[in-house]
């Protein structure tokens, strides 16, 4: 599998004027989820840069706790993904409630890290960048280029790190199903 890093989007595209941001429709969860997934895929390199800057600052101030927190989060996430592939009830939860699944991973990580005393490092170094990514992905309206890039990712023409993470959370299959339905309707 050939993994490509998505290009860094222009910062004026990442943070445009307020006209390109809107509150999501909280009543239509699937539409909101689609917006979040699309933006996570499209702006993934920008999110990586912002998170790396925040993690670097916190890591500089408290390197041991930052490394410990990162290792715990990766191990807990990997454990939950592995368990979800082996237990049907966890698989359904992960697919139907991806935000809740990530929250469970973060809470489990929090409790493990609290045993080592690095909670504030966890909050500011790991959780805060994830929260900022989620808020931006929820509020940022998609443009045509964003939608096109996501279709290419969805049908497997491109494979990116965020696409792999979303596959682990089983959030890509819906895009492929929607695209297949669209193509079959277009042929009729």
Image (cartoon, rainbow, N blue to C red):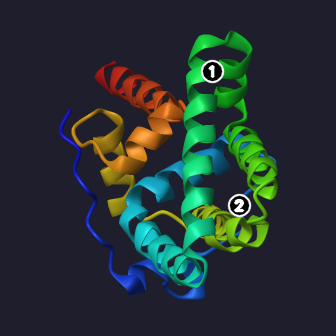
Q: Does residue 174 sit above or below 27 in this rendering? A: above
Q: Which residue is at a point 81% across and 57% down the rendered structure image?
A: 114
Q: In this orientation, which residue lies closer to the viewer: 130 or 188?
A: 130
**Residue 94 visible:** yes
Per the rendering, the mark at residue 155 is: none
Q: Considering the numbered disc 1 on the image, is that residue within a helix, a strand or a loop?
A: helix
Q: In this view, does 111 lie to the left or right of 132?
A: right
| Residues packed near mark 1 inside 10 Å, few (<14), some (14 to 19) or many (20 plus) | some
Q: Is residue 111 left or right of residue 143?
A: right
The quarter of the rendered structure image containing the N terminus is top left
| Residues packed near mark 2 inside 10 Å, few (<14), some (14 to 19) or many (20 plus) | some
What residue does disc 2 label? 24
Q: Name the mark nearer the viewer: 1 or 2.
A: 1
Q: Does residue 100 sit above or below 173 in this rendering? A: below
Q: Does residue 179 sit above or below 146 in this rendering? A: above
Asked which quadrant contains residue 88, the reply is top right
Asked which quadrant contains residue 123, the reply is bottom right
What residue does disc 1 label? 83
């Amino acid at each position: 599998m050939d993994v490509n890093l998505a290009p860094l989007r222009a910062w004026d595209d990442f943070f445009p004027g307020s006209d390109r941001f809107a509150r999501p429709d909280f009543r239509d969860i699937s539409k909101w989820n689609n917006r979040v997934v699309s933006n996570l895929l499209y702006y993934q390199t920008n999110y990586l840069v912002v998170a790396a800057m925040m993690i670097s600052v916190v890591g500089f101030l408290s390197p041991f706790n930052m490394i410990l927190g990162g290792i715990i989060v990766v191990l807990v996430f990997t454990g939950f993904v592995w368990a979800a592939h082996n237990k049907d009830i966890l698989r359904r939860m992960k697919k139907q409630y991806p935000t809740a699944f990530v929250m469970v991973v973060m809470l489990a990580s929090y409790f493990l890290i609290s045993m080592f005393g690095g909670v504030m490092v966890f909050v500011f170094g790991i959780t805060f960048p994830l929260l900022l990514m989620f808020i931006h992905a929820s509020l940022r309206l998609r443009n045509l280029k964003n939608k096109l890039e996501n279709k290419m990712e969805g049908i497997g023409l491109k494979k990116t790190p965020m696409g792999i993470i979303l596959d682990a959370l089983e959030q890509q299959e819906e895009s492929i199903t929607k695209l297949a339905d669209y193509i079959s309707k277009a042929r009729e």
